[in-house]
Image (tube, rainbow, N blue to C red):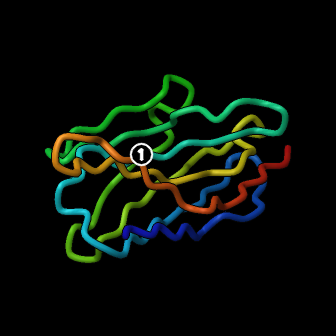
Amino acid sequence: QVQLVESGGGSVQSGGSLRLSCAASGDIRTFTTMNWYRQAPGKQRVLVATITNRGTTNYVDSVTGRFTITRDAAKNTMYLQMDDLKPEDTAIYYCNVQILLVVQLVDFWGQGTPVTVSS
């Protein structure tokens, strides 16, 4: 069973930085993508950043150039470096891993970590 634990959320002023971490326990060797999602109050959860098992990264337009997703395979940990934060980045941030189990992709989620950006 895979478990994901996020950390690093908090409150910052506009223009500040935070680094989120997502530590995975269990066997994630067959993961296809690792992702960060966020859910703002009253809104749906949306994909923010992705890193594939080949190291390819993708970002939603609103964070491109400000956020960086990385992975430390030795530590089984994924990170989201968030710079130049804006009030609209305020949300609960969730990490997600998609793992290929035989022929099925299975999603695992962390519990979320809150980020609040004040103007």
Image point (62%, 42%), residue name: 38
Residue 47 percent location from the top left of the image = 51, 34
In this rendering, the answer to whether 80 lies above or below 84 is below
Residue 116 percent location from the top left of the image = 78, 53
Q: Residue farthest to the top?
A: 61
Callout 1: helix, strand or loop? strand
Between residues 61 and 7, which one lies in front from this camera angle? 7
Image point (38%, 49%), residue name: 69
In this rendering, the answer to whether 65 lies above or below 6 is above
Between residues 72 and 108, which one lies in front from this camera angle? 108
The amino acid beneath tag 1 is Asn
Image point (18%, 55%), residue name: 30
Apparent side of residue 101 relative to residue 14 in the rendered image (left or right): left
Count the marks: 1
Residue 71 percent location from the top left of the image = 29, 60
Judging by the rendered image, the residue that carries numbered circle 1 is: 35
Apparent side of residue 74 relative to residue 13 in the rendered image (left or right): left
Q: Residues within 10 Å of mark 1 (few under 14, many from 20)?
A: many
Apparent side of residue 33 relative to residue 59 in the rendered image (left or right): left
Apparent side of residue 62 relative to residue 85 in the rendered image (left or right): left
Q: In the rendered view of the protein, which quadrant contains the C terminus?
A: top right
In this rendering, the answer to whether 91 lies above or below 6 is above
Between residues 55 and 39, which one lies in front from this camera angle? 39
Image point (84%, 33%), residue name: 42
Q: In the rendered view of the protein, which quadrant contains the N terminus?
A: bottom left
